[in-house]
Image (cartoon, coloured by chain):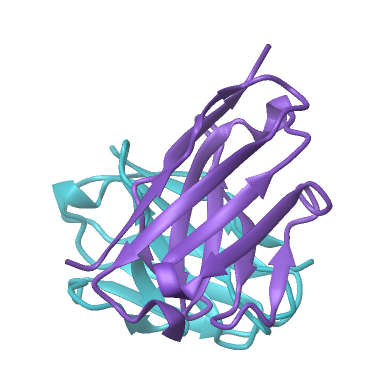
Amino acid sequence: EIVMTQSPATLSVSPGERATLSCRASQSVSSNLAWYQQKPGQAPRLLIYGASTRATGIPARFSGSGSGTEFTLTISSLQSEDFAVYYCQQYNNWPPKRLTFGGGTKVEIK
Amino acid sequence: EVQLVESGGGLVQPGRSLRLSCAASGFTFDDYAMHWVRQAPGKGLEWVSGISWNSGSIGYADSVKGRFTISRDNAKNSLYLQMNSLRAEDTALYYCAKAFGYFDLWGRGTLVTVSS
């Protein structure tokens, strides 16, 4: 099973500042990496897939980069609605391989 | 409207069974793989199980393998999760999700509580 590790667990950022979230895979997942945003009481929302492609309706301030085992989600200028928990997920070779999520990064107001 | 609606959750005793359902609408259901993802209270997301469009490929997390069974009925635009031998650690909000590998559509979830 591919283990996904996100860092930091919590990121304190002021509105308008840049946030950089990291995700590391225990083995290469190529570009088969997605990012999700989850707010309290809501289902996750797809932000990025293919490591760097924004999903429909996602603002340009969200960008993804990386391949292989190291990935980054950048939020260029944090808005109030961006404070949430962010998860990465690998989907390399499913089926038959299993899918796995990272443990999440909580972005909170500084 | 494109949506997924889960049902079937509830309070169940350890060792008992429960069957979750997910009703899909607004898209061609049998074009897509479908998955179950769960989230224990205050915890992160955990992939549970997935099934390909034609049920030809099925996978399970180690934590549920041998106890849970995923299935789908394309004629009814529905996804199912049969959960047997439930444990306290299965307590979670269970989401149904449409997939290209990544999950581009999620339901609101159905809560399963395993407790005596």
A29 to B7, vertically: above or below: below
The vertical placement of B25 against B43, above or below, is: below
From the viewer's perspective, is residue A87 above or below residue A60? above
Residue found at the very far top of the displayed protein: B116
Q: Write down the colour of chain A.
A: cyan
Q: How far across and how far down the image is residue A95, in percent?
A: 68, 81
| Residue pictured at 21% horizontal, 72% vertical | A58
Q: Place residue A39 in its image quadrant.
A: top left
| Left/right of residue B43 with respect to residue B24 in the rendered view | right
> Number of marks in the image?
0
Image quadrant holding the N terminus of chain A, namely bottom right
The residue drawn where x is 72% and y is 68% is B59
Snapshot quadrant of residue A2: bottom right
Residue B101 in sight from this viewpoint: yes
Chain letter for purple?
A: B
- Residue in the foreground of this view, choosing between B86 and B93: B86
Q: Compare residues B75 and A37 and report the one nearer the observer.
A: B75
What x and y, as percent, mark residue A64? 40, 77
> Is A18 left or right of A33, judged from the image as shown?
left
Looking at the image, residue B22 sits to the left or right of residue A17; the answer is: right
Residue name at image x 58 percent, y 50 percent = A103
